Image (spheres, rainbow, N blue to C red):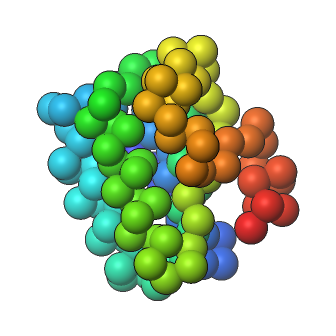
């Protein structure tokens, strides 16, 4: 799993590559939380176009960031879901609490 971060205003764009499963979820969670706290981030945008697998631990990472940011009025958004990740989102119900978009511009305009 590789992670790239970008900051645009108070938005943290998190690009995930590879697999987000129970082996790596706690490390990813810690890295994202450090970036949120260090940079006074309001919103997190997960770009998942290069992720090929996610299990329930990955869903937990996203839901946890949703809870963290909801406390301060922030949002969590996901972009570029492939069929596997979309299915995980549908089954878990996460697609009902976070915004899912096809491109960055559409996501930014929703904030």
The residue positioned 83% from the left and 53% from the top of the image is: 105
On screen, residue 51 versus residue 45, left or right, reads left
Residue 85 visible in the displayed image: no
Q: Residue 66: image x %, image y %?
A: 46, 60
Residue 40 visible in the displayed image: yes
On screen, residue 110 versus residue 37, left or right, reads right
In-front residue for pair 40/60: 60
Q: Quadrant of residue 6?
A: bottom right
In-front residue for pair 55/16: 55
Say if 31 sits above or below 68 in the image.
Answer: above
Q: Residue 57: image x %, image y %?
A: 27, 36
In-front residue for pair 96/27: 96
Say if 96 sits above or below 84 in the image.
Answer: below
Q: Residue 9: image x %, image y %?
A: 65, 78
The residue positioned 32% from the left and 44% from the top of the image is: 60
Q: Quadrant of the N terminus?
A: top left
Q: Quadrant of the C terminus?
A: bottom right
The number of callouts visible is 0
The residue positioned 20% from the left and 50% from the top of the image is: 27
On screen, residue 108 versus residue 13, left or right, reads right
């Amino acid at each position: 799993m590789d992670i790239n971060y970008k900051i645009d205003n108070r938005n943290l764009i998190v690009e995930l590559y590879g697999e987000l499963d129970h082996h790596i979820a706690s490390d990813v969670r810690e890295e994202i939380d450090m970036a949120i706290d260090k940079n006074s981030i309001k919103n997190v945008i997960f770009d998942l176009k290069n992720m090929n697998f996610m299990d329930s631990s990955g869903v937990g990472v996203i839901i946890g960031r949703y809870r963290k940011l909801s406390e301060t009025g922030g949002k969590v958004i996901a972009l570029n879901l492939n069929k596997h990740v979309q299915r995980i989102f549908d089954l878990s119900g996460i697609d009902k609490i976070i915004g899912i978009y096809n491109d960055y511009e559409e996501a930014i305009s929703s904030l």
